[in-house]
Image (spheres, rainbow, N blue to C red):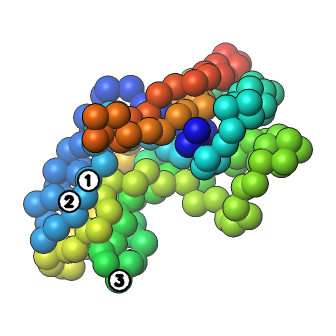
Amino acid sequence: MRTFIAINFNQDVKNRLINIERSLKNMSEKGRFTSKDNLHLTLIFLGEIAEERVKLAQLCVKNISAPKFDMVVNRLGRFKRPEGDIYWAGIETSPILTSIYNQLYSNLNSYDFYIKDSEYVPHLTLARDYVLKDEEVMEKYKEGFEKIIIQVESIQLMKSEMLDNKLTYTVLYTKELDSTK
């Protein structure tokens, strides 16, 4: 089963992100854009795991200790790729988000989940295989980028699968974050 751990968004946040995608579409020659239903922040990608290990992954999420917090989307960026870039919305550095990531990483490693050892760069993928029409227009758009504040109240263990030729994400488990800030 293909799995990952994520922060999902409410419809208002998804609508704001879709508006950013529309602007990106208008500035592109081509690109594949994340569907509204699939917009999320990946905390850790687990990849393919056996069905019997899902309960262990759930336990790793359940054992997170963190308060609810505000997460801020504060910029656009890209990962350059020869076949087309990946455009993303970046997340402002947050001690709580970093703590959640570190706890997940530690918990998962203690149960022998293989997690790629690299620096965590929190971002929301908006477009893949993206080819920009005009760099100058993009730079102006980035300068006027309006921050999005997201209230994070939970994290989810997710399943990723193709259903009727559509990439579909399903929540397997939700960990509610603590009410005290």
Q: Is the C-beta separation of discs 2 and 1 under 8 Å?
A: yes
How busy is the neighbourhood of tag 3: few (under 14 within 10 Å), some, or many (20 plus)? Answer: few
The disc label shown at residue 33, or none: 1
In the rendered image, residue 84, in percent from the top left (x then y), is placed at 30, 75
The disc label shown at residue 24, or none: 2
How busy is the neighbourhood of tag 1: few (under 14 within 10 Å), some, or many (20 plus)? Answer: some
**In this orientation, which residue lies closer to the viewer: 156 or 10?**
156
- SS for dot 1: strand
What's the distance in space between the residues labelled 1 and 3, CA to CA? 17 Å
What's the distance in space between the residues labelled 2 and 1, CA to CA? 9 Å
- SS for dot 3: loop
Q: Earlier in the sequence, mark 1 or mark 3?
A: 1
**Residue shown at the point (38%, 26%) measured from the top left:** 10
Q: Is the C-beta separation of discs 3 and 2 under 8 Å?
A: no
Image quarter (top left, top right, bottom left or bottom right) of the N terminus: top right
**Which residue is the extreme one toward the top?**
179
**Which residue is the extreme one toward the right?**
110
